[in-house]
Amino acid sequence: MPGNKKSAPLRSGERALEQETRADATIQASQTGQTGNMTVNTHSRAMSCQYKTTRHPSEIDSGNEFHNHGARSEHLDHAEVSVEVSLIDALKTYDDEAWGVVFNCCQDRLRHDIVASLRRRGLDSQYADDIVGETWLTAAEKIVDLECQDFETFYHWIRVISYNRVRNLARKKRPMMSFQDIEETQIEPNSLVLDAFLWSHTLIEMSPEREAETREQKRQLEQSLYSLSPRDRELWLRRHLDGHSPAQMATDFSLKPRS
């Protein structure tokens, strides 16, 4: 598989996840007194979870299981910001120490985000542990195809994986609606309620042409967003997807409203 391509399920979940993640971050920021050492800023958290090794890449043992991550803790230096061997490259060799670092850095935050996604869909948080486990297994399977060099992008990647798991679960748990229910929601004859119902329940699909157009639009949007700084990207998403007012964002980011 080419390393610079994302799978279709990952692409399809990214845009919806962006909107939900920003909403969750706003809620989490208002509950900092209740969340202990949990932080909204993924980049700041990554800086305290750096990976350092004195080994040459050729010396990394690719046969280690990624969950056995406690054997060589002497190679970890959480104060280091720059690294000689990138964390992502070490993950691709299934280095147990590198996987231990990302597991310890991401586990609590990942579970918190998954629980928030479940609750948003009216699903029981008891599913969180299973989704966490499935997410890490999928990440281990697909890590060799990941193209990124920073921790923030890595976390976003595993978050998309977990988000797709939640969406799949929501589809399975979605209650069936009868056509009588549809008729009762009709506002007027020939309204689009039935079309909306069929679309939301994936009973109709986009044409190949429309699907290709939408995919290209998503690709262009993704490229534009990732060209922004993390703060500017979050401001754009909150404004255009979450509908936050300039005044609200100015308060959240300690900015002047006209900025």
Image (spheres, grey):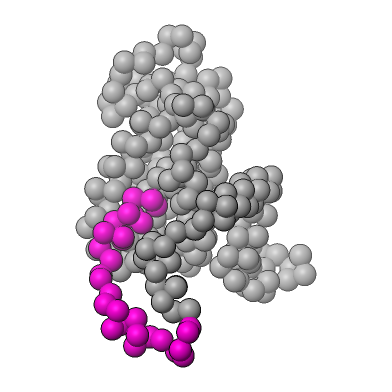
Where, quadrant-wise, is the C terminus in this rendering?
A: bottom right
User: 81 above or below 128?
Assistant: above
Q: Is residue 5 left or right of residue 226?
A: left
Q: Residue furthest bottom?
A: 188
Q: Is residue 216 above or below residue 73?
A: below
Q: Is residue 8 magenta?
A: no
Toward the left, the furthest residue is 126
Tell me if residue 83 can be seen: yes
Q: Is residue 35 left or right of residue 150?
A: left
At horizontal 56% and vertical 19% (from top left) the residue drawn is 84
Residue drawn at (44%, 73%), measured in percent from left and top?
Answer: 195
Which residue lies at the image location 57% right of the left edge and 52% below the top edge? 209
Residue 192 vs 148, above or below: the answer is: below
Bounds of the magenta segment:
163-191
- Image spot of residue 252 (x, y percent): 60, 66
Q: Is residue 15 visible in this depiction of the protein? A: no
